[in-house]
Image: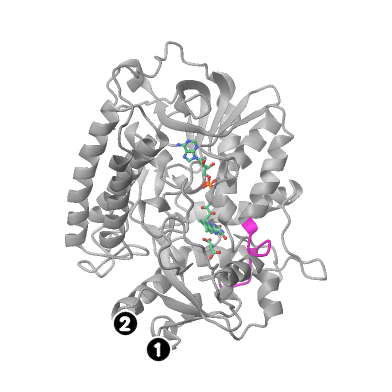
Amino acid sequence: MQTDFLVIGSGIAGLTYALKVAQHCPDKTITVLTKTQSDETNTKYAQGGIAGVMDLDHDSFEKHIEDTLIAGDGLCNKQVVEIVVKEGVQRIEEIIEWGARFDKESDGDYKLGKEGGHSEFRILHHKDVTGKEMERALLAAIAKQKNINLISHCFVIDIITQHHLGYLVTKSTPDIECFGVYVLNLASNKIEKILSKITLLATGGNGQVYRSTTNPAIATGDGVAMVYRAKGRIENMEFIQFHPTALYEPGIRGQNFLITEAVRGDGGILRNHAGEAFMEKYDKRKDLAPRDIVARAIDNEMKVAGTENVFLDCRHFSKEKFTEHFPNIYEKCLSIGIDVTKNMIPVAPAAHYSCGGIKTDEHGRTSISHLYAAGECASTGLHGANRLASNSLLEAMVFAHRSYLDAVKKIDKISFRENIPDWKTDGTNVPKEMILITQSVKEMKLLMSDYVGIVRNNERLSRAMKRLDLLYEETESLYQKTIVSPQLCELRNMITVAYLIVKCAEFRQESRGLHFNTDYPGKSERVQNIVL
Ligand code: FAD
Ligand code: SIN
């Protein structure tokens, strides 16, 4: 199969880019691949909303820029922050034109919410299911576009580069090129090659590397792992954001339901098991301090009291007020016996967002030619050491747009590469025991949660690396002799991502933003990105 533009991922980044390219180039073919159902993305689960300076009477670009820089703890690229904040408003207006609906006041103005680290009310939202509404609008617009072929249940295994033509490719090879991808088509169960002129990776996050995460099962860091294997540049993987308030449900592992930060924006108060509103001990912004601070405070409260959760107190909300903004959370809590107007909500931090990823420039270009990256899999420089709440949907749209502008200028100068070999499957066996994969996934999640969580130290990182080495060896050996499956590919990708997180964490000999190492409690004077 050949396609002019190939898009891997059907979340906000992939769909925004595909739509723009398709509208601009009606004579070109655009193929969007997604590994499960087309709407099963991190995007669909976004709750709080999208940050944007929509009310210039009370807010300003400067304030949003300043809030982003403060959250990023000295590591944001200021130029990129300015780009995202200023261009973001046009991108929000576009998605509204494509049909996304955000809540409005009775006078027609947008209802704007507030979340941790924001100095103003600037979060547009659709109740507490903003991502679902944005994903719906984008998929509906895509369905009307004749030159887009959206293929679900198609698992991308690897990016094709000169390496597949028999050349030695290393990190110092000057012009690594992307010619397309190998995919496991789950409908036919065959491995196919798709050749493309330009490819965009929009593969989302990697929360599944941890035992507790707000991310769905698809979030296994595939794009980052593929680029690393292809010898592209990866940056700042140590900055994993733990959301302070995932719903604590004993026994639930895999995807933890999120209690949006907007609940604290509307007045929710964190309390420990003694009933104390503890955030004032940690930060003057209390419950609305940036996420790294709140998550560490909760972690500390849990460790001191020996508990597995704290509580979010919303008992002072009226039922009307709560259900108007958070109907989905209300129903979810009720379904497990919690009436939020009478009972406090048990919450605990969970892995939520990857601030680092595939290194890109301000046009979304990766270090590999003809390969772009946008959305959560990319490291654009916006988030620095800690992402400001509700900035990621914004970033995804801004960089999808910038990648599109750059790609359409280049497409006519690029040809398909001939003579790409088929995937080699000779001599591989059908896996006999799934347990070899599932047990390794469990071990990896456990070691990452226990040793590479909210608080780290050198001993824990070194233990994590030793255990990952063993898992890596075992998994590579299995991969060499077994027919590939999504489960095996995801395990392999997650081990690579876990390795990258630990490696970057070892290199960062300081505590900054989301990375807190008790052996280096202060900030280094040398402010640097870690690039692998
Ligand atoms: P995703 O939406 O995750 O899409 C990834 C796509 O890549 C999927 O289609 C997947 O199938 C595909 N894919 C991955 N690997 C492969 C492969 N190997 N082969 C084929 N396809 C593949 N951000 C905000 O700004 N505001 C919020 O309110 C907010 N709330 C959130 C709440 C939750 C519970 C979560 C989990 C995240 C939240 N975020 C929020 C973060 C935000 O939702 C994500 O960062 C963003 O949606 C990522 O979009 P994306 O397009 O990069 O990737
Ligand atoms: C939330 O709604 O709390 C999540 C917002 C985000 O991750 O940006």
Q: Residue 363: in sight, yes or no?
A: yes
Is residue 85 found left or right of 156 in the rendered image?
right
Q: Is residue 500 above or below residue 65?
A: above
Is 71 or 2 nearer to us in this picture? 2
Few, some or many residues within 10 Å of mark 1 (<14, 14–19, 20+): few
Q: Is residue 41 above or below residue 69?
A: above
Q: Which badge, 1 or 2, comes first in the chain's sequence? A: 1
Q: CA distance from mark 1 to mark 2?
A: 9 Å
Is residue 267 found left or right of 451 in the rendered image?
right
Q: Classify residue 239 by image quadrant.
A: bottom left
Residue at image point 63% right, 82% down: 317
Numbered tag placed on residue 435 in the rendering? none
| Image quadrant in which the N terminus is located | top right
| Image quadrant in which the C terminus is located | top left
Q: Amino acid at mark 1?
A: Ala
Q: Is residue 369 above or below residue 56?
A: above
Q: Classify residue 123 by image quadrant.
A: bottom right
Reading the image, the residue beneath label 2 is: 305
Is 467 or 72 nearer to us in this picture? 467
Is 135 or 433 nearer to us in this picture? 433
The type of colouring in the image is one colour
Q: State the extent of the magenta-drawn residues as a range.
A: 119-130
Residue at image point 20% right, 60% down: 460
Residue 176 locus on image (x, y percent): 37, 26
Residue 189 locus on image (x, y percent): 47, 25
Mark 1 lies on a secondary structure that is: loop
Reading the image, the residue beneath label 1 is: 274
Residue at image point 61% right, 61% down: 49
Q: Is residue 332 above or below residue 499?
A: below
Q: Amino acid at mark 2?
A: Ala
Q: Is residue 88 magenta?
A: no
